[in-house]
């Protein structure tokens, strides 16, 4: 954009590769369909590694829980006492 006049910017044409854009859109749609197939076939999939991979893929997308605030010395002491008592 720098070094161009207003007229050049307004009248300049850009090459848009429409087949490439459609292929990218189709790839996104295909990946969505494959994910749906994974969800539907999950109960029937006997391969343990594949089932674990499907579960891990969806767990990784979930939002992470907020970090637990650090406990004070008193709270740590009370928690330790409860653990030692077996509660």
Image (spheres, rainbow, N blue to C red):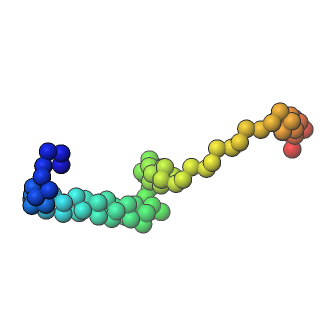
Is residue 5 among what the camera can see?
yes
> Residue at position x 12%, y 52% from top?
5
| Placement of 50 over or under 77, stated as above or below | below
Q: Quadrant of residue 22?
A: bottom left
Q: Residue at x 18, y 49 (%)?
A: 1
Where residue 86 appears, x then y in whole percent? Answer: 87, 40
Horizontal relation, residue 67 to residue 28: left or right: right
- Above or below, 72 relative to 52: above
The answer to whether 24 is drawn above or below residue 80 in the figure is below
73 is higher (above) or lower (below) than 64: above
The image shows a total of numbered marks equal to: 0
Where does the C terminus fall, quadrant-wise?
top right
Residue 53 position, x and y percent, is: 44, 49
Depth check, front residue: 38 or 28: 28
Name the residue located 83 percent from the left edge and 33 percent from the top edge. Answer: 73
**Residue 83 makes an appearance in the image:** no
Q: Nearer the viewer, residue 72 or 78?
A: 72
Q: Please state the horizontal and vertical placement of residue 81, each as a whole percent of the image.
A: 89, 36
Measured as percent of width and height from the top left, residue 6 is found at: 14, 56
Left or right of 38 in this view: 68 = right
Side (left or right) of 11 relative to 72: left
Instruction: Using the rendered view, name the quadrant where residue 77 is placed.
Output: top right
Question: Which residue appears at 48% of the width and 53% of the height?
Answer: 61
């Amino acid at each position: 954009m720098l070094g161009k006049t207003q007229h050049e910017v307004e009248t300049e044409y850009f090459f848009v590769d429409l087949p490439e854009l459609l292929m990218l859109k189709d790839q996104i749609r295909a990946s969505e369909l494959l994910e749906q197939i994974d969800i539907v076939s999950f109960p029937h999939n006997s391969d343990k590694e594949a089932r674990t991979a499907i579960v891990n893929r969806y767990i990784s997308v979930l939002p992470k829980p907020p970090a637990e605030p650090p406990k004070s010395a008193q709270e740590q002491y009370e928690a330790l006492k409860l653990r030692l008592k077996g509660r």
